Amino acid sequence: MSPSPETGASLNAARRARDLDRLADRPDVDLLVAGGGVTGAGIALDAASRGLRVVLAEKHDLAFGTSRWSSKLVHGGLRYLAAGQVGIARESARERHILLSRTAPHLVRALPMLLPLHPQTGALQAAFTRTGLLLGDVLRLSAGTPGARLPPSRRVSRARALELAPQLRPDGLRGGQLSYDGQLVDDARLVVALARTAAARGATVLTRCAVEEADGGGALLRDRLSGAALRVRARAVVNATGVWAAGLAPDVRLRPSRGSHLVLPGRLFPGLRAALTLPVPGHRARFALVLPQLDGGVYVGLTDEPVAGPVPDVPEPTEDDIAFLLETVGRALRTPPGRADVAGAFAGLRPLLDTGPGASADLSRRHAVLTSPEGVVTVVGGKLTTYRRMAQDAVDTAVARARLRAGPCRTRALPLVGAASPAELRRIRAPRRLVARYGAEAPAVLAEARGRPCLLEPLAAGVTGAELRWAVRHEGALEAADLLERRTRAALVAEDAAALDAAAREALAEGARAEAAGRSRRPPRGAG
Ligand SMILES: Cc1cc2nc3c(=O)[nH]c(=O)nc-3n(C[C@H](O)[C@H](O)[C@H](O)COP(=O)(O)OP(=O)(O)OC[C@H]3O[C@@H](n4cnc5c(N)ncnc54)[C@H](O)[C@@H]3O)c2cc1C
């Protein structure tokens, strides 16, 4: 049987070629968005669903930038509460509710988070975090998230803490504080889902298309595959290039801050049933996190280091970052992990607005929408959790500025591709791993393997050939790196990437053969 048919949400090389041709013929659009991270993809969806003609241009690949290096938490903003930023915490809790209940319930799950009470967490700090957690519960309830979806926080006994995390150092452990937050199955999947949902609503999504110059009346795009230049006339341009924003809006001043994570093998954490929140000594509102992942690995984060100088395409964690994380986490564990246990490490740069002197860890995570003298609307700051609100604010500004005829924002109630309620997801007949990653689309991913059951055999990191094929045909993967680094996250561990490489290339070759066959059946451009 043939694999699942293309839909309006399918992104692939053939669609990209058609879209580029169409744009060259009709280069007038309402809105051009630069950047295909969570913010840019969210803007494309917001604008397309208001009825605007929108083009999203991404220099590399969807989720190439900071959006794939996050801690994958859809969080209610506890950290902001601790810093006294109640407004941001409230907005986070509201946006978390929207993701959990309507837009992406298939990609976000409730994550139990345990703060162990060891001697280094004194009574005062314990009382401080308990108060924060209680306030977090108030915000969760006011956002409308029921306890059945995210249970309320509570104090747990020493025995219960050790049940949830048997590897906790037992000496001096008084118990723990247990709370719940949202965890994304994969941050890059959220971005891809947003871009595909936008495409289904008519947005043109072009990866490997850099915005080289922009002003309020349009932009010069460069197709990085063919080298061709394309001038797009746009009534409004939104710069959503995150930490690279100053490249298109030199007035925007950012103070990037590097956050690093380690990838540790799950076998070091047998029986771990909760994430761990571990206070960083000497800081009241800074924590290291131990985050169990769906694929069995465990991430350990998070640093917050100011970065000066040119912004690299792909930031790297330093040995100091790695040592800091191992040391902070090791203090709370029975058997501290060592450098040789680190299977992989990654770093991302937070696009924080420069608001004057002070440590980067203290800079506000609030987003800002700024309009340059040339008329480019830039949206920066914020976080993954609040992408929808950032997109709404950016599109509102662009609409008002360019006097565009657009409907109201609809994204609050607009499910992303694959979205379904937890009850519906439980009824889907497909392997649980696929349902967790693809939601209601899991059966279509499964269908990629019809007649070829070998495509369902896990190759590395649980990834199957069916997923690679799906990513090429429907998720816009154009190169092996897209498959290994973003549609799957195999490349977080070098051996997994090596093990998947041949299958990734085969999936791309198969896609190219299908595209060539399709082209030969289509009349040439301009004919008839
Ligand atoms: C370590 C770390 C952990 C984090 N953890 C969390 C978390 O758990 N939860 C949370 O809510 N938030 C978290 N955040 C914050 C969140 O990840 C970011 O705020 C968010 O991903 C930024 O998304 P963005 O789309 O604005 O930028 P990006 O994802 O960086 O996207 C910008 C895009 O623009 C493209 N681009 C650049 N220049 C051009 C050009 N000239 N033309 C076209 N395209 C261009 C880039 O290739 C890139 O894809 C974390 C951040 C970091 C650094």
Image (tube, rainbow, N blue to C red):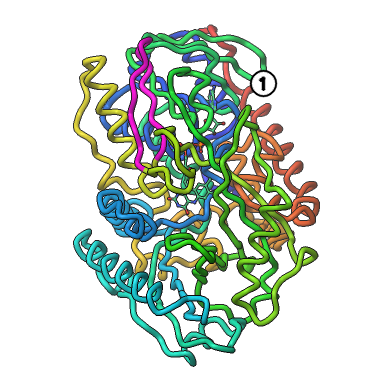
Secondary structure, mark 1, is loop
Q: Amino acid at mark 1?
A: Leu
Residue 376 among those drawn in magenta: yes
- Taking the image as drawn, is residue 205 in sight? yes
Q: Residue 450 placed where, x, y %?
A: 62, 56
Residue at 45% across / 71% down in the picture?
A: 113
Task: Assess whether residue 73 is covered by the magenta stretch.
Answer: no
Left/right of residue 115 with respect to residue 347 in the rendered view: left
Residue under label 1, please give it: 225
Q: Position of residue 445 (x, y in %)?
A: 55, 53
**Which residue is at the front of the view, 210 or 469?**
210
Q: Residue at x 50, y 21 (%)?
A: 19
- Against 81, residue 240 (above or below) is above
The quadrant where residue 165 appears: bottom right
Q: Is residue 465 visible?
A: no
Stretch of the chain drawn in magenta: 366-381
Residue 118 higher or lower than 321, as above or below = below
